[in-house]
């Protein structure tokens, strides 16, 4: 089954955080670097993915800036992004298949790559 609507994205994100929060490589960002309230965070991240996958203009904040701030609290390294992406891809593959599932995996990797460059390397790949 493919990712078709907001309920599917919620299912995906709950499954992702069930892996990410206890994860030995990135879990501390959610539990120690900040104490994330998952039930408050979920509507924001679901808006984000509705915007990315379905072009519904709901997410209006700046996810890169949020992670630049996290980077100042506890510096990101390549291994954190690699882990985040591999958990995300595995979660998509566990639950969904199809055009949107493939798009989600592609967008996750491309956004993670930009985020990595704008945090670890402090600059943009296109010169801004
Ligand atoms: C090293 C990998 C990553 C870690 C450890 C991480 C961790 C976090 C944490 C702790 C927050 C909550 C920040 C806060 O509320 O102050 C957050 C927010 C968020 N993350 Fe990540 N993240 C990572 C990569 C990504 C990637 C690659 C994406 C997108 C593809 C993403 C999308 C988001 C979004 C949309 C938010 C909400 C931003 C907002 O409040 O407007 N994250 N992340």
Image (cartoon, grey):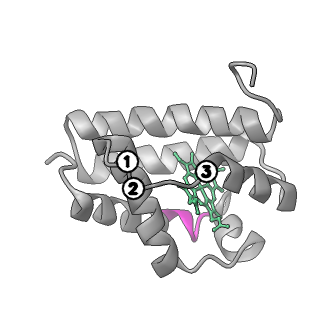
Whether residue 18 is visible, yes or no, is no
Q: Secondary structure at mark 3?
A: loop
The residues bearing labels 1 and 3 have C-alpha atoms spaced at a distance of 13 Å
Name the chief secondary structure element in magenta. Answer: loop
Which residue in the structure is indicated by mark 3?
62
Query: Residue 80: horizontal and vertical position, in percent?
Result: 68, 48
The residues bearing labels 2 and 3 have C-alpha atoms spaced at a distance of 12 Å
Which residue in the structure is indicated by mark 1?
51
Q: What are the residue bounds of the magenta stretch?
A: 19-23
Farthest-out residue, left = 1
Query: Residue 86: horizontal and vertical position, in percent?
Result: 51, 44
Residue 45 painted magenta = no
Residue drawn 62% across the image and 76% down it? 36
Which one is nearer the viewer's eye here, 27 or 37?
Answer: 37
Which one is nearer the viewer's eye here, 93 or 101?
Answer: 101
- Label 2 or label 1, whichever lies nearer to me, is 2
Residue drawn 57% across the image and 69% down it? 21
Q: Give the number of the disc on residue 116.
A: none
Which residue in the structure is indicated by mark 2?
58
Q: Secondary structure at mark 1?
A: helix
Which one is nearer the viewer's eye here, 81 or 54?
Answer: 54
Is the residue at mark 3 in contact range of ligand 1, meaning its CB lies under 8 Å from it?
Answer: yes
Q: Secondary structure at mark 2?
A: loop
Cβ–Cβ under 8 Å for marks 2 and 1: yes
Whether residue 92 is visible, yes or no, is yes
């Amino acid at each position: 089954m493919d990712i078709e609507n907001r309920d599917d994205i919620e299912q995906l994100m709950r499954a992702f955080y069930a892996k990410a929060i206890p994860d030995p490589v990135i879990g501390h960002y959610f539990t120690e670097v900040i104490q994330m309230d998952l039930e408050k965070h979920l509507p924001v991240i679901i808006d984000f993915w509705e915007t990315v996958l379905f072009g519904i203009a709901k997410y209006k904040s700046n996810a890169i800036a949020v992670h630049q701030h996290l980077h100042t609290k506890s510096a990101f390294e390549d291994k954190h992004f690699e882990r985040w992406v591999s958990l995300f891809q595995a979660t998509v593959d566990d639950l969904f298949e199809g055009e949107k599932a493939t798009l989600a995996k592609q967008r996750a990797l491309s956004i993670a790559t930009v985020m990595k460059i704008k945090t670890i390397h402090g600059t943009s790949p296109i010169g801004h």
